[in-house]
């Protein structure tokens, strides 16, 4: 049981990492496009 | 019983198509990188054959320009980057005590995008008007004017970028969340550290390249004028955005190799790495500085004096953390019980060659002097010393270092040494004379040249053929090692240290089903 909780926490942390990095990808893409639009 | 279950996996073609195993995917990446290296290498031989003597003899000038363009794109996006991602896939889970990567299915997808992207890029050469001929930097207006082959390449770059971004997200998620208990960040092997920082660089700059390429596509097909001066746009905008990606890209190609050198040198000097903490901070400093030096690639566009001074000093500053790294590698070797097996030769050779490239980089950083060197063969010599020195030497160092672990067999040391020395001599023969050609004024990306440049060009062509021929030895060495040979021990090297060496050689299909404890 304790192990399952540990795995769930790790899964949540992985999802959070992926979400934060995806946001960074979007921000950098939009920033690059903005240099052309500004 | 549990081990047998975990070792179970599909066989034949479906194993390789549907695999989510980090070792299988690592192998796929490495094979792909080697195939692309051969394709890019053949293109370099076309270039060098044409430059054997002045005048036009083998190919027409437009095709020559396509060769210089696609050679660079294939080598950077098809060979060096996938090669290091292959190493990351094989090694990172084993080095941090994880069973696999954090996102194994995405890992499969990251790889299988690559062959299609590479095919698109190569097919571009066969389109009406041929492939892109604007140079790998794809500067407008040439890249706006190119034929359909340019569109193939731009789409291929998008796909390669997506693959890199997915791979990097996976690597960061793995390193931050899958480490064995007790392995704090500052206990991680240097190869893992350099890849963590490289993955952040990739995530920060690949979307910037994607943004620039998207604007280029809309300029070509949807009536926008981002880079078209005639429509109110600015071609220099491309140069800024491209090099904001392009300079960190150099460190993306170089930093994982620094990680490899930092693993190998302590092993064969039989001493711990000198200055581990400073190595980590130097790597992070190089990565940070790589974001604020991009305009040193474009001094000649006409920048304000303040801009030129800023980019000159910021560029020179990179020599400090790089110097720290070189100092630490030398200090690690100092009074060590050194032996010179093939991986150590590649590591020392890589540091030596890269340092020459770093010194010519300092020369190029000086703004007024760069006006003399810009777009000459001096630049070609410089970046080949940097990228070949780090990436190619780093990849061969890594593959010979870990091949016994991966296959369970020792490779043939004599063949390994022949491969190293022939490549080392061939490489220097190719690129050292190009410094002199550049200083004497020979421009890059031209199929013809003035008579007085003939001798140095001939040396260069002989060296290129020698370098490529030497890779046949590596091919034979790798195949022979995969098929058999002396049994490798689990530790393989007397001085090796780290979790991967606690696994059997070859390691089980799933490494570390139970997490090891790190003290």
Image: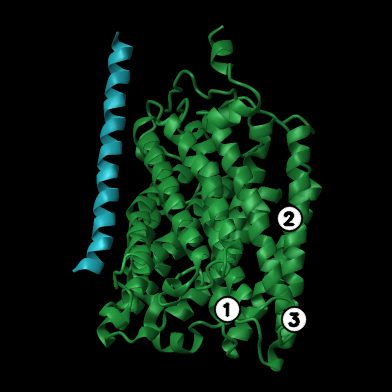
**Which residue is the site of mark 3?**
B57
Left or right of B248? Residue B442 is: right
Q: Do the residues indicated by labels 3 and 2 lie within the same chain of the protein? A: yes
Earlier in the chain: of badge 1 and badge 3, it is: 3
| C-alpha separation, residue under disc 2 versus residue under disc 1 | 25 Å
Q: Position of residue B206 (x, y in %)?
A: 38, 55
Residue B285 seen anywhere in this rendered image of the structure: no
Q: Which residue is mark 2?
A: B471
> Which callout, 2 or 1, points at the residue further toward the start of the chain?
1
Tally of numbered discs:
3
Residues marked 3 and 2 touching at CB (< 8 Å): no
Q: Where in the figure is residue B203, as x and y percent of width and height?
A: 35, 50
Query: In percent of the image, x 70 and y 73: which residue is there?
Result: B48
- Where the C terminus of chain B falls, by quadrant? top left
For disc 2, the neighbor class at 10 Å (few under 14, some 14 to 19, many from 20) is: some
Residue ranking furthest to the left: A38
Q: Chain of mark 2?
A: B
Q: Nearer the viewer, mark 2 or mark 1?
A: 1
Q: Quadrant of residue B302?
A: bottom left
Per the image, label 3 sits on a secondary structure element best described as: loop
Q: Colour of chain A?
A: cyan
């Amino acid at each position: 049981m304790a192990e399952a909780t540990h795995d769930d926490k790790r899964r949540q942390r992985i999802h959070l990492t992926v979400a934060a990095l995806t946001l960074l990808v979007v921000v950098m893409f939009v920033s690059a496009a903005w240099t052309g639009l500004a | 019983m549990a081990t047998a279950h975990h070792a179970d996996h599909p066989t034949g073609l479906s194993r390789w198509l549907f695999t989510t195993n980090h070792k299988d995917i690592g192998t796929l990446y490495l094979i792909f990188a080697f195939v692309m290296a051969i394709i890019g290498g053949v293109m370099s031989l076309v270039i060098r054959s044409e430059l054997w003597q002045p005048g036009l003899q083998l190919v027409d000038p437009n095709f020559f320009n396509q060769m210089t363009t696609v050679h660079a794109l294939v080598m950077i996006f098809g060979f060096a980057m996938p090669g290091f991602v292959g190493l990351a896939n094989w090694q990172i889970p084993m080095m941090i005590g994880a069973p696999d990567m954090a996102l194994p299915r995405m890992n499969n997808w990251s790889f299988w995008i690559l062959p299609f992207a590479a095919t698109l890029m190569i097919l571009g050469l066969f389109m009406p008007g041929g492939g892109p001929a604007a140079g790998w930097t794809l500067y407008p207006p040439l890249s706006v004017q190119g034929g359909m082959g340019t569109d193939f390449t731009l789409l291929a770059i998008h796909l390669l970028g997506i693959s890199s971004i997915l791979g990097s997200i996976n690597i960061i998620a793995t390193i931050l969340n899958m480490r064995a208990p007790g392995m704090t960040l500052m206990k991680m092997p240097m190869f893992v550290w350099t890849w963590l920082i490289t993955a952040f660089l990739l995530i920060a700059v690949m979307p910037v390249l994607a943004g620039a390429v998207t604007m280029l596509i809309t300029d070509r097909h949807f009536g926008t004028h981002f880079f078209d001066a005639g429509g109110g746009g600015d071609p220099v905008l491309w140069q800024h955005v491209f090099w904001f990606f392009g300079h960190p890209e150099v460190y993306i190609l170089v930093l994982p190799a620094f990680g490899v050198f930092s693993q190998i040198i302590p092993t064969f000097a039989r001493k711990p790495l000198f200055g581990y903490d400073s190595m980590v901070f130097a790597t992070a400093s190089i990565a940070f500085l790589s974001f604020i030096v991009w305009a040193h690639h474009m001094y000649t566009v006409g920048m304000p004096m303040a801009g030129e001074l800023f980019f000159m000093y910021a560029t020179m500053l990179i020599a400090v953390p790089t110097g720290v790294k070189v100092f630490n590698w030398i200090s690690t070797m100092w009074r060590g019980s050194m032996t010179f097996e093939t991986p150590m030769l590649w590591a020392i050779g890589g540091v030596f060659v890269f340092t020459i490239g770093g010194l010519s980089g300092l020369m190029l950083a000086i703004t007024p002097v760069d006006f003399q060197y810009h777009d000459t063969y001096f630049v070609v010599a410089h970046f080949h010393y940097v990228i070949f020195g780090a990436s190619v030497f780093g990849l061969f160092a890594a593959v010979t270092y870990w091949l016994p672990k991966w296959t369970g067999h020792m490779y043939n040391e004599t063949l390994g040494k022949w491969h190293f020395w022939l490549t080392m001599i061939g490489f220097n023969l190719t690129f050292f004379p190009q410094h002199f050609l550049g200083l004497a004024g020979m421009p890059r990306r031209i199929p013809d040249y003035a008579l007085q440049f003939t001798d140095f060009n001939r040396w260069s062509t002989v060296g290129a053929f020698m370098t490529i021929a030497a890779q046949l030895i590596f091919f034979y060495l790798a195949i022979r090692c995969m098929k058999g040979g002396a049994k490798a021990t689990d530790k393989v090297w007397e001085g090796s240290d780290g979790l991967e060496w606690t696994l059997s050689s070859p390691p089980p299909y799933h490494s570390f089903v139970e997490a090891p404890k790190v003290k």
